[in-house]
Amino acid sequence: MRDSYNRKIDYMRISVTNKCNFRCTYCMPEAKKVEETLSLDEIYQVAFAASECGISKFKITGGEPLVREGIVDFIKRLNDLDNVKDITMTSNGFYLLKYADALKSAGISSINVSLDSLDREKFKKIAGVDALEDVMAGIEASIKAGIATKINTVIQKGVNDDELFDIIELAKNDRVNIRFIEMMPIGHGKESKGVSNFEILERMKEKYIITEDTRRHGNGPAKYMKLEGFTGSIGFISAIHGKFCDACNRIRFTSTGKLKPCLCYDSNIDLKDILKDDSLSIDEKNTILREKINECIVSKPLAHSFEDISKISELKGMSEIGG
Ligand code: SAM
Ligand code: SF4
């Protein structure tokens, strides 16, 4: 289906939980009182209706999706739907060693693992957990399971910018792509100092021979570069310094039942009451859900306003929205 700006909307990010076993400083440094989440069956009903509205690609996110019990079966059910072409996941990697093979069998094609430092102490400072080894083992397991594996890194000034080249070097011989995500002024991201992808690229140019990589590596807005002598590519998600809203293809659904047309604004359609209404038959619910999903697509704004903090109405953090 197309939105009112004629953009094709075929991608939904589903947050299956807002709980997480990490406490990343720019995401959810404090232990939060977690709002009630929907059951996976209720989330499935929304995904089913979305697939009937032309959504064919799903990203499973959170919080941490792998802390949600029943997540592998949920993915299997989603993968069995006729219209579904691609299911991917974003994870902190902690439980990947345990789940990689099962996720591959369930139908996950690609996983983005968040990794901001290769230094044990610094990792602990950023993620709030001493888990670098577990995450590295998870990345390894994901590659071995045959899942296309990408590493998501948010570079922060004075925190991990000294590790830029160490992180890039992970793509040299391994079959992983690295993607630099610009810090967004969402949640605690407002208090954190990111480094622009433009600056990262300029630093890379001093060290590597770089050419544009025009192959598609996913369903998102990352622009990729090839480095001479490297197996993996380096991607840039430049939400702030390279606004890509004209190619936006997505809507979001949170684990508490909110359909979101755009990351930047609080505007949402709450599906919780519909999903909890026992007086409605499954078919009646499905019809209403499809209407609401279409309404969400049509109400997508032209662009985000991350460059003007006064216009950002979304107050929730990334762990509640799903990134
Ligand atoms: N727990 C999973 C993970 O860490 O990948 C999935 C959820 S997490 C909210 C998704 C992604 O959002 C992570 O890659 C994280 O680094 C990123 N993220 C969180 N807060 C951010 C912010 N303010 N700006 C940019 N990226 C952010
Ligand atoms: Fe958890 Fe992911 Fe947020 Fe870190 S970025 S606290 S791993 S949800």
Image (cartoon, rainbow, N blue to C red):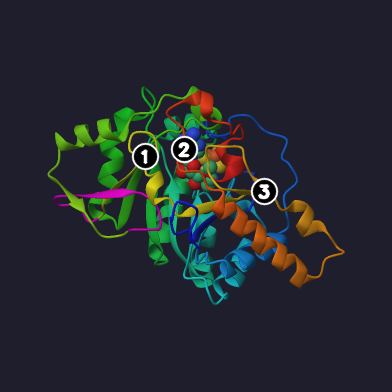
Residue shown at 45% from the left, 55% from the top: 249
Q: Closer to the camera, 112 or 323?
A: 323
Q: Is mark 3 within 8 Å of ligand 1?
A: no
**Which element is circle 2 on?**
loop
Q: Which residue is mark 2?
A: 304
Report the Cα–Cα distance between label 1 and label 2. Answer: 8 Å
Residue sitting farthest toward the right: 279
Q: Return the x and y of residue 285 as percentages of the image width and height.
A: 75, 65
Q: How many angstroms separate mark 2 from mark 3 (CA)?
A: 18 Å
As for residue 28 lying within the magenta part, the answer is no
Q: Is mark 2 within 8 Å of ligand 1?
A: no
Which dot marks residue 293?
none
Q: Residues within 10 Å of mark 2 (few under 14, many from 20)?
A: some
Image point (72%, 61%), residue name: 42
The verdict on residue 224 being magenta is yes
Q: Name the spot of residue 46 as percent of width and height, x first.
A: 66, 61
Question: Earlier along the polypeptide chain: callout 2 or callout 3?
Answer: 3
Three-letter amino acid code of the residue under disc 1: Lys
Q: Main secondary structure of the magenta part?
A: loop
Q: Name the element at disc 1.
A: loop
Confirm or deny contact between disc 1 and disc 2 (CB under 8 A): yes
Q: Residue at the location (59% across, 52% down)?
A: 296
How many tags in the picture? 3
Q: Which residue is mark 3?
A: 269
Quadrant hosting residue 7:
bottom left
Quadrant assignment, res 195: top left
Q: Is residue 182 above or below residue 283?
A: above
Q: Where 201 falls versus 95 (above or below)?
A: above
Segment tinted magenta in the rendering: 217-231
- The answer to whether 148 appears left or right of 200 in the picture is right
User: Would you say residue 108 is visible in this rendering?
Assistant: yes
